[in-house]
Image: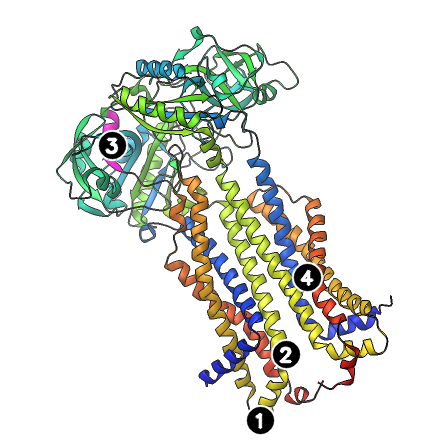
Amino acid sequence: MISYYLRLASKSFGRTPGLTTLMVCAIALGIGACIVTLTVYHAMSGNPIWWKNNVLYAVTMDSWDPAQPADTDHPALAPSQLTYRDATYLMSSDIPRRKAMMTVLLGMLNGAPGQTTPVPTMTRATTGDFFPMFDAPFEYGGGWDAAADRESAPVIVLSHEYNERLFGGRDSVGQTIQWNGRQFRVIGVLKDWQPTPKFYDLNEGAFAQADNAYVPFNWTRTLQELPAGHSSDWEANSPGTYPGYLASEAVWIEMWVELPTAASRNRMLSFMNSYWAAQRRAGRFQRPLNNHLTNVSEWLKINGVVSSDTSILLRLAFAFLAVCLINTIGILLAKFLKRSAVTGLLRALGASRRQIFWQHLVEVGAIACAGAAAGLIVGALGLKAVQILYAAASSGDAGASNYTALAHFDVVGVAWALALAALSTVAAGLYPAWTVGRLPPSRYLKSQ
Amino acid sequence: MSLSIRPMLASLLRSRTGAILVALQITIALAVMVNAVWIVSQRIVDIEQPTGIDDHNTFVVAIAGLTSHFDLSSALSEDLDYLRGLPGVVAATATESVPLTGDGQSTELWLQPGQRGHSFAVGEMQLDTQGLETLGTSLLAGRNFNSSEIEHSTPWKLDLTPADIIVTRTVAKALFPGENALGRVVYDTAGKPITIIGITRDFMGAIGLGNAPYAYAIYPQIPGAYGAYFCLVRTVPGRLDAIMRTAQQHLAASNPNRVIFFTHSLAFYHHRMNANDRNMAIFLSTVTALILAVTCLGIFGLATYNVSARTKQIGTRRAIGARKRDIVAYFMVENAFILTAGVVAGCVLALATGYWLSLQYALPRLDLYFLVGGVLFLWIIGQLAAWQPARRAASVSPSVATRTV
């Protein structure tokens, strides 16, 4: 029966090729626009480590100015980073299963075989748990242990991209390379790992490139180097020396902990609270108690990672799809009613209402499928256009974001196209098909 | 011209589904169009804000030492001497942060010591004596720094506060509204007094502070807090690319202890700064144009269907004396009813959407002129879309009435 309906449908398309093309185009444009915005929205609002969402927590304490909040637009939020003294104290806790503190240093990589000019790179200075905690995948070798953290061992982990660039992509574990003029041993190379958004450090831009080199955190202290990442201080007097900086109220360290159970979470929070109380008695933390362990999805939300433009565009795309579908309903209704004499004849010859309904629905379904297929092409082209448009926003060095990575056509886009096509069929086809099936045949057998 | 509205309405109500669907499209199209055009107009205002600097003839060289023991200050003065000596260079300065990148430092200036009284947040630009000329801005009042006032910042003097600063007109007006700010004293966060010795035309510096793109104070300083610095170079018009290439090659080779990170023109950063606004404007305009096109096709389709479904009736009317223009008028007025219904509902939806956008995304409230303009525009293109089918209806021959279908 389906094949007979399809034959009828193709005949119907042949009779009105213009209208059919118009409907397919309208559905294709609507679906294409939705695919583009949904893909970008999905990438922006995605949680790159969803499988650990309720295990990983950002640690924040409100150590800011007693007179005003750190962010006057969001006064309830504590600073997103910690001071050195708070971070080092909290790192001494053995409640979390894993824990990492981190900052960004400017690094110069030099002395790889065949290298002629030094390569500047933003280097993440962090502790060894960073890699297992964030499930960072290794191509070669691995990370470092707690001893390396204590002794600031000269070990370095490279990104896939920089291993390609410096060592031609081969297993470079055991090789030495200069980092800021000192010999470091490569102990690991990551696979191509681009957590999007870069949840563990949103300060350099939520869609910034992943880091290209990783060294033990204590190198910050050994080299007495100021962080190249975000650092802010509310105190009136600036610290005059590096030890002064470490002892100051400047916040510049991101800290994450892995707490597998609710009990460990509670213990960690009470550990933070008792530290807060002791420090408060000593004169610090004069703001209200605002210690937080924030999971990844909440962290992305409170830091406003999804731009409001993106969610406006998402809604716009759905409004557009709605107009396209209403348009299609109108055209289909007109078309079905116009040939109601034929439908009446079929009914008179014994076709049931149900059969008439299905006949028309098959016709609509065929249009929706064609629209979805064309919509996939429109969506892919649209995403290409987005990449080209955002290339300007993604290039350059200071303050660049990696927006183009957001606009990759992926399985999500295809899934949405199929879902939207099915939805369009139902939305655009049900009413016309039902209307036509319901009409009494006698009325349409009469002449006008 | 005799138009009987009653029978027209009756006929419209009898076959209302098609008309309702078209009116619904018009409703959504109007709401989307008005709000999209409103948002785009705001973005265009943002994009066209003048930078106040000569971004097309200025470029930046980013330089960093290989190790923390790199002798930054002597390398920096060598580089500046070289850059200033190049033919075609108007002026050059060293700086800690690059204008239009969004990456820089900010602080607050207070009217009274001890963080009391009125205060104003400003972006900091550390520049030397050639700073103003390099940016392409100029003094409105007061004087430039002289070379003895320029301090060298070092890693452990992060908030080196000078005795004198130059501020933009925006800062001067915000701190001393209605008064002359020149020569007045303000205080830094530590309570140290600073004298305003000059006021410049507004320009955009490195870090954009909320709604104050021109709030900057110039500190007479040479970078040194980090192991890196930027040189800003302004060239005579038309020579930027050639000078940028020469400078990059020379600087990369002249000192083995450091690296050239990158060179870019400030026009590049200006373009990047506006990329998000520009892209949003492009997306909104494209989708709005498509929605309008689809809606017009819907209007056209409905009118065409109505004409073809009523061919016999049109013939009958023509046979009993209706003129061609009566037929055209009938379809145009019928279309006008549908349009008006859609537009009225669209006004409500547009206002509701505008209100919701202003609540949800803190966008400015929809300007009512945009609504009026949108209504007129949509009404006119809606009528144009029905014009061709109406003309075709008028060309139906009266003899059709005598034939059966």
| Residue B68 position within the rendered picture, expressed as x and y whole percent measured from the top left | 26, 21
Q: B215 above or below B20?
A: above
Quarter placement of the C terminus of chain A: bottom right
Q: Which amino acid type is marked by label 2?
A: Leu
* Range shown magenta: A208-221
Please, which chain is the residue tagged with disc 3 on? Answer: A
Circle 1 sits in a helix, a strand or a loop, which is it? Answer: loop
Camera-nearest residue between A269 and A7: A7
Alpha carbon distance from label 1 to label 2: 18 Å
Does residue B227 appear in the picture of this structure?
A: no
Circle 3 sits in a helix, a strand or a loop, which is it? Answer: loop
Dot placed on the residue nearer the N-terminal end, 2 or 3: 3
Alpha carbon distance from label 2 to label 3: 74 Å
* Residue B116 sits in quarter: top right
Residue located beneath label 4 in the image: B385
Q: Which amino acid type is marked by label 3?
A: Phe
Circle 4 sits in a helix, a strand or a loop, which is it? Answer: helix
Residue drawn 40% across and 63% down? A415
**Disc 3 and disc 4 on one polypeptide chain:** no
Residue located beneath label 3 in the image: A217
Please, which chain is the residue tagged with disc 2 on? Answer: A
Q: Which amino acid type is marked by label 1?
A: Leu
Alpha carbon distance from label 4 to label 1: 40 Å
Alpha carbon distance from label 3 to label 4: 68 Å
Q: Nearer the viewer, mark 4 or mark 1?
A: 4
Q: Which mark is residue A337?
A: 2
